Image (cartoon, helix red, strand yellow):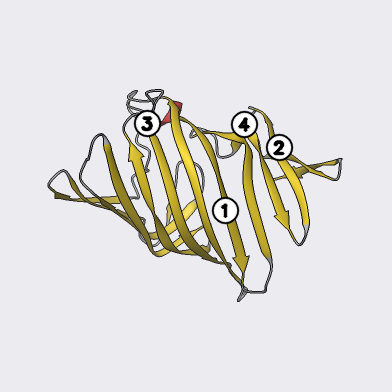
Amino acid sequence: MNESLFPECVVITIQPNGDGGTLILDFGEGCQLNNGAFVTGKITLVYGPFDGGTRTINYTFDNYTYNNNAVSGGGEIFRQIANADGNPQSTTNEVITVAFPNTDVTATRNGMHTTIWTEGVGSGTWLDNVYHVTGNWDTTFTNGFERTGLVTQTLVRRLACAYVESGTLEVTQGGFSGIIDWGDGTCDNMATLEIDGQIYDIEL
């Protein structure tokens, strides 16, 4: 059975232009995604033409919110139909700003990540899609706070799960660093944080 990645509350507009074009995802004044997140506004993706099995996609957020956090900015995706192992792969460079509700603090993230589609390719449903993610990013808050992240063990994300299922991320902030570990592949909202050899359970 085919399953759409997006629920019925999303209005999808496609504007072809040769072998490229524009795709607009309009979530209106409120739409709950299949992963449980509540979003509003639009995401616009402009697809360039295919060139040797690759294409570039530029995306922007327009009055977009994710679980009441306002998101602006966008990025560029370099998409390969097949990498050296035959898997679809995308490398994203983005600069996005998030404004949090009930505060005047905003956070701007400048990052790069590579996503490899490892399972579920061509199955016709998003439920079995699995992605492996690596990358790094820097986040600067308007109150002067800074945080960096570096994937030290590939993050595994199954779209049927709302959380990362495994992998590790090194986080540095205020001169301190720690390792977030998502565990052994169980779909849950629990992880561990290791700081100076001490391990703490955290709820995401």
Residue that appears at 30% across and 47% down? 56
Numbered disc in front, either 4 or 2: 2
**SS label for mark 1:** strand
Q: Is residue 28 left or right of residue 106?
A: left
Q: Are marks 3 and 2 in contact (CB under 8 Å)?
A: no
The residue under label 2 is: 181
Separation of marks 3 and 2 at Cα, in angstroms: 26 Å
Separation of marks 1 and 2 at Cα, in angstroms: 17 Å
Residue that appears at 86% across and 40% down? 197
**Label 1 is placed on what type of residue?**
Trp
Q: Earlier in the sequence, mark 1 or mark 4?
A: 1
**Label 4 is placed on what type of residue?**
Cys
Crowd tier of the residue under label 3, counting other residues whose Cα lies within 10 Å: few below 14, some 14–19, many 20 or above = some
**SS label for mark 3:** loop
The residue under label 1 is: 137
Q: Are marks 1 and 4 in contact (CB under 8 Å)?
A: no
